[in-house]
Image (spheres, grey):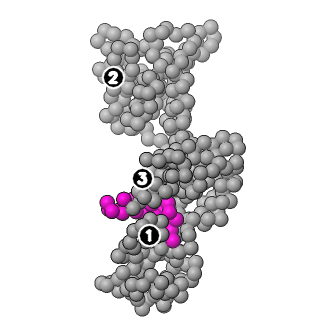
Amino acid sequence: MKELQFKQILQDTWSNSRDMYAPLRVEDFTFEPTIAGESTADVVFTLQWRGRTLSFMGELKSSATPRSMMQAMERTQYPGGGESPETLPALLLPYLSPGIVEQLERADVSAFDLNGNFFIQSPDFVAIRVDRPNAYPTSRDIKKIYTYNSSIVGRFLLRKNRTFEQVNEIYESIQELGGGISLSTLSKVLKGLADDILIEKEFGAIRVLQAQELMQNLIDGYRPPRVREEWKLKLPDDISAQRKIFNMALGEEGWMWSGESSAPAYVATTSPALGKVFTPKHLSTNNPLQEFESQRFYNVILQQTDDAYVYFDRRDKLASPIESCLALSQLDKRERQIAGQIKYSILERFDDRF
């Protein structure tokens, strides 16, 4: 939502619905007030409650990313312009979520949204309402920066604890590791990560700030690859024999063990009873693997997918440690415990442990 659009909606809403923050009532408001010709705030307003008046000096925030919220709260903590000491700092937002309330509480700042939600902190009392749904959802340039191929950026930044000087340096490294994303996609995802305060992105310095939170967002955003074809195979139990068969049928670079099946390479655990293999190749009906097909007694599933994030940073025939961790995190308790061990080894290099 644009700033002017947000301002107009807020002004119309307050004019037509003074009781939107019931039991409080919007008594008076002035946008862009001035003192001696100087603007003092985006808006000053008063609320009435049981004969009591609460005065606020507010800043409009048409978007509420963690970074923009932090900057806005730093500004509103120190209201100036000659306002009364009883005037409370406040943010005006399209939507006030419980997560934002946690930030506001630490900063001692109040907030109101377009839906009737509010969080008030005064020297005498605290009032909160956050049960009204968001009627003004917003979207990023890339809506799901932790999902599918967009997640490649976060995965790459977690490979090593280092600082990059240029976006192109990251882009070229991602391409070398098999991440087929565009430069524009990379730039948009980096901006989103910076807005979420998970990375620092200043001139000459791009680095991870919160590795644990970045990893958790990747876990929460993980989706299984989109499978176009699937073959169920009965292969010899010996892994070396299976490897030889796949090399013959798909070529040395034409297949890879899934994240779940790659786990024994990264932690002390047994191989899963049912193996899983990914291939970017489309399987023909006369493929040599056809003789191993079995719908009842299969021990390996071969899936064809074009999703680049699965193959990104592969280690020969193994999925990357991060792909292994993310895939295992979606499964049952035992698999999640294995994922936790891999996760620890990834975060260990960042001094950001759990």
Q: Which residue is mark 2?
A: 127
- Count the marks: how many? 3
Which residue shows up at 35% across the image and 83% down it?
Answer: 298
Whether residue 343 is situated above or below residue 36 in the rendered picture: below
Q: Earlier in the sequence, mark 3 or mark 2?
A: 2
Q: Amino acid at mark 1?
A: Pro
Q: Which residue is mark 1?
A: 264
Relative image position of residue 341 (x, y in whole percent): 42, 58
Q: How far is disc 2 from disc 1 in space, using C-alphas? A: 52 Å
Determine if the magenta segment contains residue 328.
yes
Relative image position of residue 313 (x, y in whole percent): 57, 65
Q: Is residue 2 left or right of residue 126?
A: right
What stretch of residues is rendered in magenta? 318-337
Q: Which residue is mark 3?
A: 220
Relative image position of residue 155 (x, y in whole percent): 54, 56
Q: How far is disc 3 from disc 2 in space, using C-alphas? A: 32 Å
